[in-house]
Amino acid sequence: MQQVTLDTKRSLLRFLTCGSVDDGKSTLIGRLLYDAQLIFEDQLRGITIESQRKLGDEAALDLSLLVDGLQAEREQGITIDVAYRFFSTAKRRFIVADTPGHEQYTRNMATGASTADLAVLLVDARKGLLVQTHRHSCIASLLGIRHVVLAVNKMDLVGYDEKVFRTIEAQYREFAKQLNFTSITAIPMSALLGDNVFKHSNNMSWYQGLTFMTFLEDVDVGDTKIDGPFRMPVQWVNRPHQDFRGFSGTVVGGSVRVGDSVSIQPTGTTAVVQQIVQFDVSPDVAKKGDAVTIVLDREVDVSRGNVICSVAHPTSNVERFEAHLLWMTELPVQPGRQFLCKLGTVTVPAVITRITSKIDVNTFTQIPTDRLEMNEIGVVVVQLETKVAHDIYDNNRDMGGFILIDRTTNDTLAAGMILRDVVQVQNITWHHMDIDKSARANLKGQKPAVLWLTGLSGSGKSTIANLIERALWSEGKHTYILDGDNIRHGLSSDLGFKAEDRIENIRRVSEVSRLMTDAGMLIIVSLISPYQSERERARRTIGDEFIEVYIDTPLEECERRDPKGLYKRARAGEIRGMTGVDSPYEPPTLPEIHVKTMENTPEKSAMLIVAWLRSNGFLQNH
Amino acid sequence: MDHLSNLEAESIQIFREVAATFERPVMMYSIGKDSSVLLHLARKAFYPSIPPFPLLHIDTSWKFREMIAFRDQIEKSLGIRVLIHRNEEALSQGISVFTHGSAVHTDQLKTVALRQALDKFNFDCAIGGARRDEERSRAKERIMSFRSQHHRWDPKRQRPELWHLYNTRINPGESVRAFPMSNWTELDIWQYIRRENIPVVSLYYAKERPTVERDGQILMVDDDRFPLNPGEKPVMRMVRFRTLGCYPLTAAVESDAATIDDIVQETLSARTSERAGRLIDYDKPGSMEQKKIEGYF
């Protein structure tokens, strides 16, 4: 074992290894630890025995076994989950996250990347840049990693050819132009044989740069912890007895001094810091990274989830923001889905109201979409149930990163990074059911409604209903027509045309409409529904979504059209209870829409109705 | 901020998340150096309140006597409640490492006992002092590690854990094992014990102790339940322990390190891992992972 000094002040470098499967990530870490003599003897004995069993070779030593700690990983020879290794040299302390290359386990790569300052991206010299190379680069960049080592591995298998290395390096630099990296360092190596890992390679005299280890020891990742204005999310209210009330949390931005005025977000109240408490000391100042308990000078309403912050630069607290989202679960996501969002110390219900685009990881360009599949990264709009203090991710990772949690299984489904706030354009009503009407409707990108077309037989209800449906359908809306005649063939086939049967028929249609609006649909009811009182009852059943549309055609015109020959038969006395003939029709007194068919073609009538829906906000895209 | 203060702050943040989001948390207390540091961190996290959860000691009845004395003294001096649970059923059946081997011993007196205790008290989160540098499968574990209703760990389906945002949500019957010291190393522990002047069991300090040597491992004869082989006689050796568990399963190392400074120095130059002294890890390859899947800490 290498001797290390006692100095606890050495800097810490947190990095991850990533890249495609079989590029040699675990082997590289194993090789680094082995050559640097940082492996305990009993651990080395353990993997020596396992290597021999696995490879059937006395002299074989599979260094990847040092980090692939799960049985399934060692059996399959792959990495499934991120492993953390800790090591020190005389110059530095390191925490390395060895992450999996399989696309299936991208979520575990993101887990490892979220706390790293530098990414080591492995590339198999024989294969060059692969989709996973690009994907991992995108994720690292979006998560805020600014420094990359391009480890071109398996150089031994391409005859240590400089041209191969230079080509890959050039291709990667070209690709990475679109990403937010500040430094890219390419190193040709063989993790298996140790070339340029800990020792300089004799096989690649053309490479004059640093070895991997020397680079890690010397690299300056700069101040990734941008200080920014003061932020402390309250984790826990500390109240041991009546005379003490403090707010415990970790400072995630800036610093605060005793005597400073602070703002409490999202409530916006202010107070002055009276005392900063730690276990054995009461320091005058709390800086970023410190876990403290703050006592304020006055009784203000502060609880878990509030953020104590700078008065001059308070956090934002709007409920709606645009964010990059990494979707990490098998079932794809579409707008309208509800979650729990954990941001800082707050967990609140949230809904994705819009998915704008996804990132093509190979070109880093945005493709319009309305759904994200597993491991895709998209731009989405998230609506929170309440105001939550937050910042833009690039300004403060702890205040701008969030996770989305499944409301039923509690699985972590996605990780998000806030890009910007979205100012509210309309108030979205909130319901506490897991999946409710607005969620279903949002999924369809629409607002539920019941267009209740009432009018005499032959007034043109069915024709207009069809035209409305075609217009809505062409806009991608999910609609359904409940037509009086069709209903009577099924749902109401047991009913006749007596007054009580008509009333029951309307009741049934109302109830079905209500269910369908709950399912988020746009319903077009085409029903004579002659009685004012019955239409009012339907309005009460259906609620705000009920839109009464009076298809106004004079009786004479209906009788002239008589498409089903009903008027003729009624006049001849063959059928009884015909509305307009021997049964009354009560025209609506205050319909939402009044369409006069003598003045408009059916097409024009349908257009007027759709226009009404649009101007009343039913067809807005969310 | 220096490295130890960094680790300390990270651990405190985890403790506070647990206290704020779980209904019935408990802190596992195994009396060793890691538990001593864990307890110290818990006291710091909630000061001036006392930690808002009890401690739980799973007593196999095979712990070193010095450990039990230390536990009782800590309970008295800090005024913190220590719950003690034993698998009485297994003990009444006479299950022990000497008669049933280490696998049955660990399963019955530790894993099953722990599950019994968690069920009995209905704890929804158990805080433990495990560190990722201890063992390969521990290196894979999340800080908030989800357990099914049957206390099982599914290493292939761990929740993603980004930044310092911990998903602490569970359904009834499920639980979480929380590991505030995941990112500490053995050396960090000793340096922190020195910096903070934290009391630890005297077994960590070198002293002349009655021992026997078996299969290259030095075992301490702590009481007369230790069955000596014919002709075997305890020999006084200058030894200390790097890690503490059940005395028949914990090997000592020959050492002269009698002070905390000596121990830090010795840890710096160690050539074997501390778990080299834990015999249960050698039951079979991947044995720690298997034990964890079944509910072991």
Image (spheres, coloured by chain):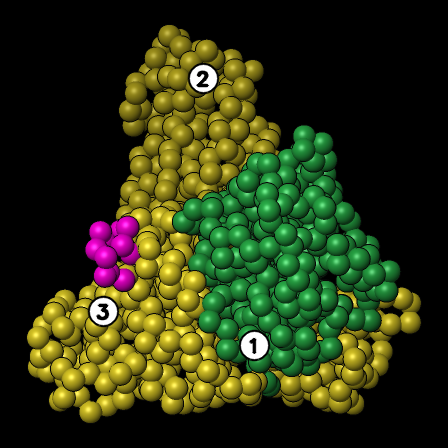
Chain colours: A yellow, B green
Residue at numbered disc 2: A492
Q: Chain of mark 1?
A: B
Most foreground residue, A424 or A290: A290
Give the SS element for disc 3: loop
Q: Are marks 2 and 3 on the same chain?
A: yes
| Residue B178, placed above or below residue B116 | below
- Magenta highlight range: A51-61
- Do we see residue B119 in this rendering? no
- Check disc 3 and give the amino acid type: Leu
Place of residue B277 in the rendered image (x, y in percent of width and height, measured from the top left) = 54, 59
Q: Does the magenta segment cover residue A59?
A: yes
User: Which of the 4 image quarters holds residue A479?
Assistant: top left
Residue at numbered disc 3: A192
| Residue A438, placed above or below residue A258 | above
Image side of residue A299 versus residue A104, left or right: right
Residue displayed at 71% across by 88% down = A285
